[in-house]
Image (spheres, rainbow, N blue to C red):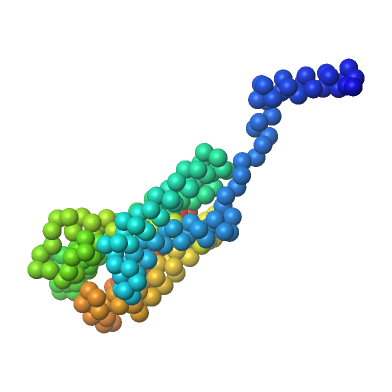
């Protein structure tokens, strides 16, 4: 039988539970662990895997996009929102900063390439070699729609889908970068440059050039490597800035 002291203690405990005092002492669960970082990386990598799976005849983009890539992207966002509501917010912060920084880096990447694309129109061919560096984007869209890669002209839908896919690559590369380094505050931003240039040079060893009729010559390699270095620079600095 409980004595009077035990009864008083039980009453105090009940009042504490009812008032909610002490709830703030319960630490939220941290989800930014090695296994979940791997999961975040894989979900984000579904964007570039969409293209690679088509190259190697594993799954065409018209099927991979709606049934694997988009569900993976939704799962990534859902995981981030779950962490924001129930976790410590670290994973959520990493995902959304990665997406935002990746988009900013993709814009910087395209701005760097504009002079090469519009060299003739700008009258700067004496200084810049004209290069049709944006020609792959409508082809991305055509592949997603299940249309022939090479067409005399591309529909507006193919153009928009292709550009959207291009920016999805940039955004998800940002997430992949943070998932790899873990804590941007403890890593130098130059790691993003290394990742970006490595990814681009790696793509040159895939069927990418053959599929899109790209001549892999010294000038093209120099320009595309420089563009990806700009992407990496913008990504690394943006992540570092947003993480603080």
In the picture provided, is 132 more to the left or to the right than 203?
A: left
Name the spot of residue 117 as percent of width and height, x first: 18, 66
| Location of residue 56 with respect to 138 vertically, above or below | below
Name the spot of residue 116 as percent of width and height, x first: 20, 68
Q: Can residue 126 be seen at all in this image of the molecule?
A: yes
Q: Residue at x 45, y 63 (%)?
A: 192
| Location of residue 106 with respect to 92 vertically, above or below | below
Q: Residue at x 14, y 55 (%)?
A: 156
User: Which quadrant would residue 224 be assigned to in this image?
Assistant: bottom left
Q: Residue at x 22, y 74 (%)?
A: 212
Image quarter hosting the N terminus: top right
Q: From this viewpoint, which residue is outermost toward the bottom?
A: 217
Along the line of sight, which residue is nearer the eye, 193 or 139? Answer: 139
Q: How many marks?
A: 0
In the picture provided, is 201 more to the left or to the right than 187?
A: left
Along the line of sight, which residue is nearer the eye, 152 or 56? Answer: 56
């Amino acid at each position: 039988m409980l004595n009077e002291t035990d009864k008083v203690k039980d009453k105090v405990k009940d009042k504490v539970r009812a008032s909610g005092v002490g709830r703030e002492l319960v630490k939220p669960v941290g989800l930014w662990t090695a296994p979940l970082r791997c999961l975040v990386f894989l979900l984000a990598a579904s964007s570039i895997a969409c293209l690679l799976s088509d190259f190697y005849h594993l799954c065409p983009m018209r099927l991979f996009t709606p049934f694997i890539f988009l569900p993976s992207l939704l799962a990534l966002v859902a995981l981030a929102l779950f962490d924001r509501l129930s976790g410590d917010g670290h994973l959520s912060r990493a995902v959304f900063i990665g997406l935002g920084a990746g988009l900013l880096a993709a814009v910087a990447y395209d701005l760097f390439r504009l002079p090469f694309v519009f060299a003739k129109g700008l009258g700067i061919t004496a200084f810049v070699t004209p290069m049709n560096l944006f020609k792959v984007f409508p082809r991305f869209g055509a592949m997603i729609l299940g249309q022939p890669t090479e067409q005399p002209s591309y529909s507006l839908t193919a153009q928009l889908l292709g550009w959207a896919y291009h920016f999805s690559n940039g955004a998800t590369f940002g997430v992949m970068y943070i998932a790899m380094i873990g804590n941007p505050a403890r890593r130098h931003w130059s790691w993003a440059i290394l990742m970006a240039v490595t990814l681009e040079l790696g793509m040159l060893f895939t069927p990418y050039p053959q599929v899109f009729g790209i001549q892999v010559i010294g000038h093209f390699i120099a320009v595309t490597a420089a563009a990806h270095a700009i992407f990496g620079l913008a990504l690394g600095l943006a992540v570092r800035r947003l993480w603080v």
